[in-house]
Image (tube, rainbow, N blue to C red):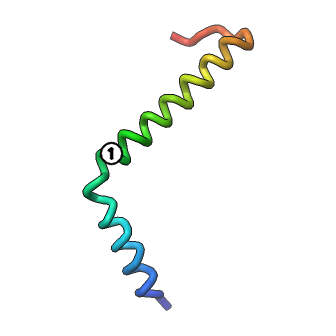
Amino acid sequence: MYNWSVQNQIIAFVDSLRPHADEIRAGYFDALYGFVDMQSHLLTMLGYPPVP
């Protein structure tokens, strides 16, 4: 029922990312905060009041 070779490949891929987890997390949050900041500026430009 299980495809063990695919599951083992997924585990190997995740394990290969572990040494770079801090950089991946920092990049994710930088992108997330950049997106939210851009949307905040857009909504303010459209006339919505800024939220404190």
Identify the residue at horizontal 41%, vertical 41% (top origin).
27
Identify the residue at horizontal 36%, vertical 39% (top origin).
26
Provide residue 30's location: percent of width, then percent of height. 43, 34
> Does residue 33 lie above or below 51 as drawn?
below
In the drawing, does residue 36 fall left or right of residue 10? right
In the drawing, does residue 31 fall left or right of residue 45? left
Q: Which residue is mark 1?
A: 23
Within 10 angstroms of label 1, few (less than 14), some, or many (20 or more) residues? few
Residue found at the very far bottom of the displayed protein: 1
- Looking at the picture, tell me which residue is in the foreground, 17 or 44: 17
Identify the residue at horizontal 51%, vertical 29% (top origin).
34
Residue type at tag 1? Glu
In the drawing, does residue 20 fall left or right of residue 38? left
Name the image quarter holding residue 13.
bottom left
> Does residue 10 lie above or below 43 as drawn?
below
Element under disc 1: helix
Identify the residue at horizontal 59%, vertical 24% (top origin).
38
> Does residue 17 lie above or below 52 as drawn?
below
Provide residue 5's location: percent of width, then percent of height. 42, 86
Provide residue 42's location: percent of width, then percent of height. 67, 19
Name the image quarter holding residue 50.
top right
> Does residue 32 lie above or below 9 as drawn?
above
Q: How many marks?
A: 1
- Looking at the picture, tell me which residue is in the foreground, 1 or 28: 28
Provide residue 44's location: percent of width, then percent of height. 66, 12
Residue found at the very far right of the displayed protein: 46
